[in-house]
Image (tube, rainbow, N blue to C red):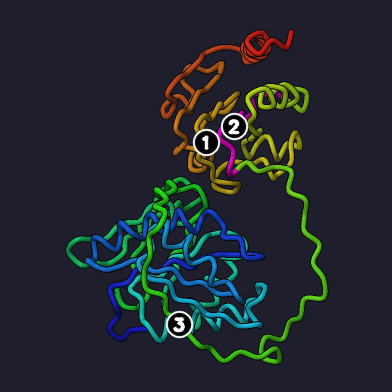
Amino acid sequence: MTAETSKEVWVYIEQEEKAIHPVSFELLGVAKRLAQDLEGITAGVLLGHEVSDLTSEIFAYGADKVYIVSHPALAYYRHRAYAKALYEVAKRYKPEILLLPATPLGRDLAGGVATLLETGLTADVTELSIDKATKNLLMTRPAYGGNIMATIICPDHRPQMASVRPRIFPMPERKEGRTGEIITVEVELSEEEVGVERIGFIPKEKTVKIELAEVIVAGGKGIGGKEGFAKLFELSKLLNGEVGASRLAVEAGWISYEHQVGQTGKTVRPKVYLAVGISGAIQHRAGMQNSDCIISINIDPKADIFKISDLGIVGDWKKIIPALIERIKKEKGLG
C-alpha cells in the first residue's frame, strides 16, 4: 500500500473466546505515544463475531477509535478469514502504522496481512519510535542471535507493520469511562473461501503463567541439574511466583521449555526477577531486562547479569537459597 495514509496508528486487538489478550493493551500504550509524535490518533481493530461488548475495554486502555468487523466466519481464528478481514479494513482506511502482538496467533496473521498489503513487516520488535525528520517508524529488534540490535525502517510502503512480543512495553493506565468513535466495517466472507472448519477444540491446560507472574525465580547453567531447580520451585511457591530458566538449563533437560526466558523463550516483566546461577548472556537479558527489580546470585563476580541487576550477591546459591527459604518460612510462621 503506497497511497496517502491517515495519521492513524492501529493495534490489532487479539481476542479469543471474547477475551482480549493483555498484550493488546500494552500495544495501545505504545501506539498512543507514536500517534502523539505523528500528531495522529490511536485505533484498535477488532475482528470476531458479536464482540462489540469488548470496545469499552479498548477505549479504557487508550484507543480513540475502534474498527469492528463482525462476521460468523470470524467466530474463531482461521488465517484466511482473519487475514482477508484485516487486509480489507487496512486497504480501505489506510493506517500509517499497524502493530500486532508477536503471539502465536499474531505471528501467523501478521505475515499474511503484510503480504496482501505488499508492505514490510518487522517481527519481534523490542523498541518503537518515530524519526522526527522523516516521520518513519523506527523498529528495533535483536539480530544475529541477539548479538546486535538492528533498527529497521519501511520508508516506501504503508502501513509500516511490526509485531511486538508480550511484556516488552508497560501496561498503560486503565481509564474507566473513556469513549471514542466506533466504525463498523462490512467485509464479504464465506466458509467456502476460508477452506478450514474447526470440528472440535481441546484447550491445553496451561500450568505455567510465567508471562504474567509478578515474581520469578529463574535458574541457569550454574544450578547444575534438576535437583537444583527443586529448590527454586520451593522458593517460588513461598513467594507466590513462577520458575523461569535460561536456554542452557532448558536444553540440558533440567526444566521444560515453557519456563524459558529470553530471545528464544518468553519475555517477562515481573516486579521481582531473581536470577540464580545465570551468567547474563544478551539473549537471556532480552527477555527479562525490563523487570522492575532484578536480584542476581552468581559465584562469578564478573558475570554479565550483574550489569543490569539492582542487587547482586556474589556467592554459592546452594548456601544462599536454602537460607532464604528458611528465613521466609520463619517469617510466615511455617516452621
Horizontal and vertical percent position of residue 69: 52, 80
Q: Is residue 218 magenta?
A: yes
Q: Are marks 1 and 2 in contact (CB under 8 Å)?
A: yes
Q: Which residue is mark 2?
A: 216
Q: Residue at x 53, y 54 (%)?
A: 22
Horizontal and vertical percent position of residue 122: 44, 64
Q: Which residue is mark 1?
A: 270
Question: Does residue 188 appear in the picture of this structure?
Answer: yes
In this rendering, the answer to whether 297 lies above or below 256 is above
Q: Are marks 1 and 3 in contact (CB under 8 Å)?
A: no
Work out how far the residue at label 1 is from the one at label 3, CA to CA, in angstroms. Answer: 36 Å
Magenta-highlighted residues: 211-224
Q: What's the amino acid at mark 3?
A: Val
Q: Which residue is mark 3?
A: 89
Quarter of the rendering occupied by the N terminus: bottom left
Q: Residue at x 42, y 79 (%)?
A: 183
Horizontal and vertical percent position of residue 179: 38, 65
